[in-house]
Amino acid sequence: MSGIEIITEPATGSAIAQKLVHKSDADEVFLTFWRRTGPDSFSVTAHWPSDRPFYRAADGGFEPLLVTETVRQLFPLICHVGYDTPFDHHLVWESYRYELDPAVLRCDGGPIELELRVVCSELVHRRSHLAGMTMDVDLLRDGNRLASACSRFTVQAHGIYVRLRGGNSDSIQAMAAAPAAPEGISAEYAGRPDRADVVLSDIPPGGRPEAISGAIPEPIPEAMADGMPEAAAGNLRAWWLRVDTAHRKFFDHPVDHAPGMLLLEAARQAARAALHPLPALPVAMSAAFHRYVDLDAPCRITARVESPALVRVTAEQHGRLCFTADVGAA
């Protein structure tokens, strides 16, 4: 990122209860205090512990996914404390993008404190309740603005959500219907220290139960492919989304579809695997959520390397596009 902004005033305010961020595991709550700074703006403090292996990279720093999870916890928090959203309402991602300076991921051996400055806009209300918003977030570490994010999401009453899901809204049944998770790809290729955290699995020869919508892309131009690994410079790379409902970081509580965080991590791992052995720190991402990914059917993740700094990732299920992400690598 460019143009570092120095801010010295710390954020203080009300303590954040676990239920406000929709987490069953109290140890996974990273937000600590919040205060309102304007009609639709807020300041929130966050705490990043250093003893969470899932959020630590192989190089010892923090995983970029921790930035996204911290931002994601803002969605329910701000909806509840800022706009009185009932707890039975569902928050549904439409789009998400972030940009970060790698300095925000530095781990000095102990926990770190951060401030998140939040601005909500394009608010939509249905009757007396919030129905959607755009949220912009600046993340500050030691007073330096080192990451930013923007997301658009809708807020749906439970009855509306059930109708939209068309009979697929029972989270207990959905979790029970999910098949056993297959073996993941190499942890090295996925950029994960622990193979249990890999969310991609190989497609066996001839394994194509679903047609992919759209044409297969042509190989990238030779000039763009110069210096890139042979595998990365070819056509699409493809894997199955590996859904492990026993993984408590992705499935903190029962859900009826693949969580958005799982899809975002799949995009990161797909970009890393497609570029391997080139380094691929995801310093930026722009993602769109088009359809729900169900737990009981295979979901195909594809990655096309546009350049050493850009990988385009898609997720398709039942021949329909469900999710797209442009991953910016450094």
Image (spheres, grey):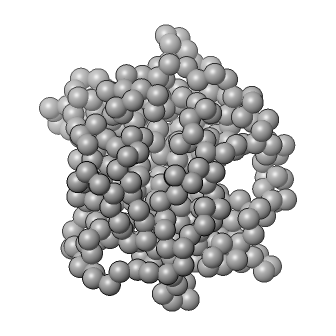
In the rendered view, does 243 fall on the left or right side of 42?
A: right
Where residue 292 sits: x, y (%)?
Answer: 66, 45
Please indicate whether residue 238 sits to the left or right of residue 318 in the image. Answer: left
Q: Nearer the viewer, residue 38 or 203?
A: 38
Residue drawn at 48 percent across, 54 percent down: 69
Let me know if residue 322 appears in the view. no
Image x and y of residue 92, in percent: 64, 57
Residue at 27% x, 82% y is 8
- Image x and y of residue 44, in percent: 46, 74
Residue farthest toward the top in the current orientation of the protein = 205
User: Based on the displayed image, in which of its 4 quarters is residue 161 positioned?
Assistant: bottom right
Residue 93: quarter of image: bottom right
195 or 290: nearer the viewer? 195
Q: Residue at x 63, y 76 (%)?
A: 81
Q: In the figure, 87 relative to 221: above or below?
A: below
Which residue appears farthest toward the bottom when viewing the image?
38
Viewer-proximal residue among 223 and 198: 198
User: Can residue 15 be spotted in the picture?
Assistant: yes
Decide if residue 56 is on the left or right side of residue 103. right
The quarter in which the N terminus is drawn is bottom left
Whole-percent x, y for residue 102 in the image:
24, 55
Front-most of 313 and 48? 48
| Residue found at x 42% / y 26% | 195
